[in-house]
Image (tube, grey):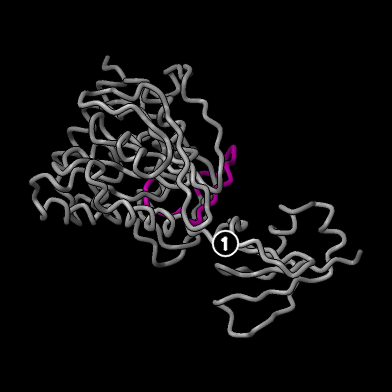
C-alpha cells in the first residue's frame, strides 16, 4: 500500500502533467482537494517544535524575508535595518531567525531574516515547519530571489502547503456540519464551480453532511483553502536581489503574475529606498499625531495604525480608562477638506491626521 508521501508525489506529478483548460478544470480542482487533504494528514503526523525561532513580534508591523539559501536575505536585512546579520557566500549562513528594525516615516517595522526555505520545508525538512510558523504570523512576506529567478513556484508551493496563501483574500464562505441530511448548498449564480464538484471536494475532506453557505463568487482553490481550516491569507512582495548582475528582463517581468516586483541590489544598495516605500505601502499603515493640552504636536513619533483605524483605537492605546471619559475628538490633517472636524469614537482616521482628545474630566 502506498504511503502518504508516495500518494502526494503521484498527485503532484499528475497535476504537473495536466494541462489546464475548461475540459480539465474540474479534474484539476479535485486533484488539488485530494492533495490538500493528504498534506493535512501528513503534517498531522509530523512533530514540530525546536528552538531558535521564538521571536516575539515588536514594532508597528512584522515583515518576514523568505527565500532559498544564499539569495542575499541577510544582506537585505542589513540594508533595511540597523541589524548586522552574518553574510556569507554559502548556503545556510542563517541558522536562526535574526530580527532587525526598519525605521521609516515614523513607523518601526520589524524585519525577520529567516533560514532559507528548501523543498519539503512544509513537512519539516531543514527545520522548515519552525520557519513557516514564523512566516504565518508576519504582516507582510518578502519573497527574496536572485536574478536567476528560479524556483519561485517551489517557494509559493511550500507556503501554500503550509496553509499560507499569498495575495488572495479570504472569501465569504460558511459551513454548518450536521449528523444527517447530506450536503445542502446555498450559493449565488455567479459561482465559478459546479455543485457536483463542490460536493466532490467536500467528500475529499470527509464531509458528507453539512449546510454550505457561499456568499460570493469563488473557485475550487477558494473552497479548498476554506476547508483546510488553517489557511492564512498573507500579502507578499517579490524582491529580485543582485539586479546588478547579468539577467533576463523577460524572466523578471514574468514574476508580475505572482504579485508586485521590486528590483534591488543589497551589495550596491540599489533600489533599497524603493523597497522601503513598497513595504510601507503594502502594510497600509497610517500615522496619527497627538496634540497635547499645551497645543504642541509630537511629530517625531506618531501613533502608527492600520488603514481603516478609527478614533476608538487611538483612545484605547492611550488609556482604556479614557474611553469612559471621552467626549469627542478634534481632527485636522492634510488629507481633510475641512480645516477642523469634531468627531466621535467610530470616525475613520486618515494618514497624518492630527488628533486632539477632549475628555469629560
* Residue 155 covered by magenta stretch: no
Query: 261 above or below 42?
Result: below
Q: Nearer the viewer, residue 338 or 166?
A: 338
| Whole-percent x, y for residue 353 in the image | 61, 70
The outermost residue toward the bottom is 338
Residue positioned most to the right: 361
Q: Residue at x 42, y 44 (%)?
A: 225
Q: Disc 1 marks which residue?
A: 287
Image height of 158 relative to 184, above or below:
above
Count the labels in the image.
1
Dividing the picture into quadrants, the one containing residue 159 is top left
Residue at (57% x, 42% y) in the render: 177
Give coordinates of residue 52: x percent, y percent. Answer: 47, 20
Q: Is residue 292 left or right of residue 66?
A: right
**Which residues are the magenta region?**
165-183
Q: Residue at x 11, y 54 (%)?
A: 249
- Quick check: can you spot residue 38? no
214 or 343: nearer the viewer = 343
Tell whether position 167 is magenta.
yes
The N terminus - image quarter: top left
Residue 69 visible, this angle: yes
Disc 1 crowd rating (10 Å Cα; few below 14, some 14-19, many 20+) is many
Look at 83% across and 64% down and name the residue there. 326
Amino acid at each position: 500500500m502506498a504511503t502518504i508521501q508516495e500518494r502526494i508525489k503521484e498527485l503532484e506529478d499528475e497535476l504537473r502533467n495536466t494541462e489546464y483548460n475548461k475540459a480539465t478544470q474540474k479534474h484539476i480542482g479535485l486533484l488539488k482537494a485530494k492533495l490538500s487533504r493528504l498534506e493535512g494528514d501528513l503534517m498531522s503526523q509530523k512533530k514540530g517544535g525546536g528552538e531558535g525561532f521564538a521571536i516575539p513580534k515588536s514594532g508597528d508591523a512584522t515583515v518576514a524575508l523568505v527565500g532559498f539559501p544564499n539569495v542575499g536575505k541577510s544582506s537585505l536585512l542589513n540594508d533595511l535595518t540597523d541589524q548586522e546579520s552574518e553574510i556569507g557566500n554559502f548556503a545556510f549562513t542563517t541558522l536562526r531567525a535574526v530580527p532587525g528594525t526598519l525605521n521609516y516615516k515614523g513607523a518601526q517595522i520589524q524585519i525577520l531574516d529567516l533560514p532559507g526555505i528548501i523543498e519539503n520545508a512544509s513537512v519539516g525538512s531543514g527545520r522548515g515547519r519552525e520557519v513557516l510558523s514564523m512566516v504565518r504570523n508576519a504582516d507582510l512576506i518578502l519573497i527574496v530571489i536572485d536574478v536567476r529567478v528560479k524556483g519561485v513556484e517551489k517557494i509559493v508551493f511550500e507556503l501554500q502547503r503550509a496553509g499560507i496563501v499569498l495575495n488572495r483574500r479570504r472569501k465569504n464562505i460558511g459551513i454548518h456540519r450536521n449528523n444527517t441530511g447530506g450536503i445542502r448548498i446555498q450559493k449565488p449564480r455567479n459561482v465559478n464551480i459546479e455543485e457536483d464538484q463542490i460536493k466532490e471536494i467536500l467528500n475529499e475532506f470527509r464531509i458528507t453532511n453539512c449546510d454550505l453557505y457561499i456568499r460570493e463568487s469563488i473557485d475550487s482553490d477558494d473552497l479548498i483553502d476554506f476547508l483546510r481550516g488553517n489557511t492564512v491569507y498573507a500579502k507578499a512582495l517579490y524582491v529580485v536581489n543582485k539586479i546588478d548582475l547579468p539577467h533576463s528582463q523577460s524572466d523578471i517581468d514574468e514574476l508580475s503574475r505572482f504579485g508586485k516586483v521590486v528590483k534591488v541590489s543589497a551589495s550596491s544598495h540599489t533600489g533599497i529606498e524603493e523597497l522601503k516605500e513598497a513595504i510601507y505601502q503594502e502594510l497600509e499603515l497610517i500615522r496619527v499625531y497627538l496634540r497635547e493640552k499645551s497645543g504642541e504636536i509630537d511629530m517625531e513619533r506618531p501613533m502608527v495604525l492600520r488603514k481603516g483605524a478609527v478614533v476608538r483605537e487611538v483612545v484605547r492605546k492611550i488609556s482604556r480608562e479614557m474611553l469612559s471619559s471621552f467626549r469627542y475628538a478634534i481632527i485636522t490633517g492634510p488629507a481633510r477638506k475641512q480645516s477642523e472636524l469634531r468627531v466621535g469614537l467610530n470616525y475613520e482616521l486618515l494618514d497624518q491626521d492630527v488628533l486632539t482628545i477632549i475628555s469629560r474630566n
